[in-house]
Amino acid sequence: MEKAKISGYQLFVLIFLFEMGSALLVPLAGEAKQGAWLVILIATIGGILLFFVYYGLFRYYPNQILTEFIRSILGNFFGKIVAFLYILYFMYLAARVLRDFGETLLTFAYPHVPLFFANAAFMLVVIYTVRKGVEVLARTGELFFVLENVLFMTFILLIIVSGMIHMNNLKPVLEINAVEMGKMAFTKTIFFPFGELIVFLMIFPYLNEPQRLKKIAIAGLATSGIFLSFTMAMNIAVLGVDLTLRSQYPLLTLIQSIEVAGFLERLDVYFLLKLMIGGFIKITVFTYVAVMGTANVFNVKQSSRLAYPVGIVILLVSIVIASSYSEHIHEGLGAVPMFIHLPFQVIIPLLLLIIAFFKNRKKTSKHQRHNTDLKGGVDK
Amino acid sequence: MVSFFKQKRQGKQQDRKKEEEKQSKTTDYIESSLSDNMEIVKRKTGNSPDIIFRTVKISQNPEINTTIVYVQGLIDNPSVTDFLIESMMKNPHLSEKILPQKALDIISEDVVSLGGVETVNDWEKLFLMLLSGDSIIFVDGINKALVASTKGGDRRSIQEPSTHLTVRGSREGFTESIETNIAMLRRIINTPDLWIESMKIGTVTKTDVSIMYINGIAKKEIIEEIKKRLQRINIDSILESGYIEQLIEDQVMTPFPTMNHTERPDMVAGNLLEGRIAVFVNGTPFVLLAPALFVQFFQSVEDYYNRFDIASATRFLRIIVFIISIVGPALYVAATTFHQEMIPTKLLVIVAAQRETVPLPAVIEALLMEITFEILREASLRMPKAVGGTMSIVGALVIGQAAVQAGIVSPAMVIIVSITAIASFATPSYSIAISARLVRFAFIICAGVIGFYGMILAFIVLVVHLCSLRSFGVPYMSPLAPLNPQGLGDTFFRRPMWAFKERPKLISSKGNLKREGENQRPLPPESRGMKTSDGRKGDGNES
């Protein structure tokens, strides 16, 4: 662990930017058609429930990061294995997001640039930030939070002014019935992006006011959920279900269709900026967490030295992860939630919580018995 | 072998130490014989002719020799001639018969009519005082000397500062003399809490360095930190406050200044009142201010003299100007090489037509023009004033017109570079304008390689870098990050004077944040029949 402290507001900002990161780009919960925004809200509630699992773990070990308390729970040997798996998971996620961003970039602006170059440039920036530590990341997040929100506000303003919103596109909301919606929310949307909050188990211990963690994290999740839901609703309201589902990046299509006063048009750069700020925070958080985890599991004293090796691995993985973008997306929608997200975000944390519960109950009950024995001794 | 040499070297070192000790024993303290003392002074100063010895005989049977020693040019001539030499010669006390042992006391008590008089007996202190302009009086047979404060000599008078110019505000600027500078601050801030601590830094130059702060407003930890860092300095010379700045700043590898400097006493006063600490260095009109934050470099003293709406608008303008001076040419390069679709069609046609004849890619063109501009700027700074006119002719004609006519650069590029140049001079602080110029080149290169993507990456690195800086422990980007809502009132806009309730939290001492009383908002008088702020009507009495 670093010697660092972040404030509640900073944590909120990090969670917000992290959740918004790549989820803004893709047609999130697109299968739900007009009900997409509702599914996102349901998933947000699911995400908050999932957070309580993580929060339970945090309550047992408030001063330890994830890779550390896994070893406290499972013992050194198994703990190390599981912790290592988590590190791989974080690196894999970082690589996925990096690939997402690289591909997006190439598709919409730089068709002639090699993917490796685009990703490598991004990774260099990420490595630079990771080396600076979590405090600097949090402060950067604060500035980007303001920028992101200013962008968002101007964007909404422009859309309203250009008169593109057709509320009729949002009807009928319940084309798909509620059961299916719930199913969609709890099998897909909850894992991406809300379940990814598990990486913050590596950051929560830095919070300078742990007693407020619950409020902060829920506020972060809820705000980002509402923002995502709002964005998706706006996508559909402007573009219609059909176009939203067909376009790879509905937000980009939306931004490209803005035309105000004859000169405010072709705001692609705006999309690029939004894309990169979100992506930057997300990849940096993943990479940072992977670096800190590795340092923790393998007892490396100077964790910042690991930024380069871990970063390069993530970069290479992001290239070889899939042979084409459609393969990448296919994996992301099919296998990853079922076989990777589900165990790492839900099953293992739940098991850990249960074991921690029994372990700590034994401890406390022993402690109590010990106390009563002592009292008895005094009485005699 | 090795150990043998080591021993030998150690032995040598010991010998040298012994020798040094011997020497210092003979010269540490003042001798009682006057001629010996004079000999030592002459030997130590290498017989320099600007050191004046004036021998005066006092007392009668036996006569006692006294010598006054001073350095020509460093002393205030009238005070030495009138109050020292003349009074020594003509004073009735000294014409009587006196004992040599008492002579020094009599001189100091009854004869010398000057403010500061002090006895010293060790040479080191004596030379320090002699060479800083004091006069020394030796009396034969006494192993002490009298030091009379006669500092003076010619110095530049107080003039208008040449940097940080303002339309409104004090016209005084600091001078090269540390005493004058400190006195100027004393004149502005009239409280005994204005504390000053002095030290001499530089093993050869022994430059006077003083730190000034307001006790109770400045944070104790920051004061201690600055003192610690100043005491750590071990260097032969301090010739300007820049030496100190580079030796005590937080981070070396950054283009951004983490200490501020100024020539204006009112700016120093304003900063002291916010809890900052000023470092005065003798020999330069530039006073250092620490800790310095990023937003502070966009503030000018005039912002506080003007009304808040005007000041806020100017602040805002400066931020825009700073952004232009960083990304101006890079934007042009990125838009013309990678993102032509971003430019409105009509403008694109014009730009494309201009670029038709230009043989160079936009990046090279931009770099070429920027470097040319930098050369022009540097040349016009350094060259003798007499040839200044040539510069503008060459610059304007050759670069502005001939290059465009020859088709080497496009006119649009010239416009962009000129706007950027003007923008970089509109930043109030010169030191942050220099940083912007450096960063600009990085942005141009990034934009040339991969367009807006590169620019945004450079922007992210810039933000991360700025967030990672600290100035004497205070985060450089505060109050923006970490966010301090109270402090935001003095960043991009300036809150009205009546709403400046508190001092900046991270800089000022915690217990003493309150700055002004409640209800400072000016209200129209009720008697004038105007409506008061809470809607009540006045009595309507116009008289």
Image: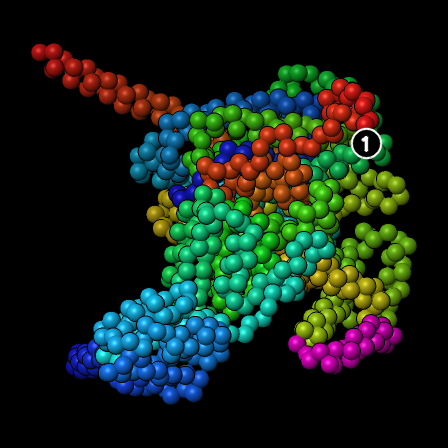
Determine whether B327 is above or below B15 in the image: above
Quadrant location of residue B501? Answer: top right
**Helix, strand or loop under label 1:** helix
B432 in relation to A248, above or below: below
Q: Which amino acid does label 1 sit on?
A: Ile
Q: Quadrant of the C terminus of chain A?
A: top left
Subunit of mark 1?
A: A
Q: In this view, does B323 lie to the left or right of B190?
A: right
The rendered magenta stretch, by its main secondary structure, is classed as helix
Estimate the x, y position of residue A111 in percent, counting from the top left: 73, 54
Image point (38%, 56%), residue name: B228
Determine the residue located farthest toward the top in the rendered image. A379
Where B107 falls versus A293 (above or below)? below
Q: What stretch is highlighted in magenta?
A: B382-407
User: Badge 1 is on which residue?
Assistant: A160
Closer to us: B1 or B31 = B31
Question: Which x, y percent locates residue B1?
Answer: 18, 82
Could you say where residue B200 lies in the image, as x and y percent from the top left?
40, 66
User: Is there any visible trace of residue A17 in the rendered image?
Assistant: no
Q: Which residue is drawn at 71% across and 78% down?
A: B385
Pick the front one: B192 or B248 = B192
Q: Which of A31 and A190 is in front in this view?
A: A190
Against B177, residue A89 (above or below) is above
Q: Is residue B374 left or right of residue A368?
A: right
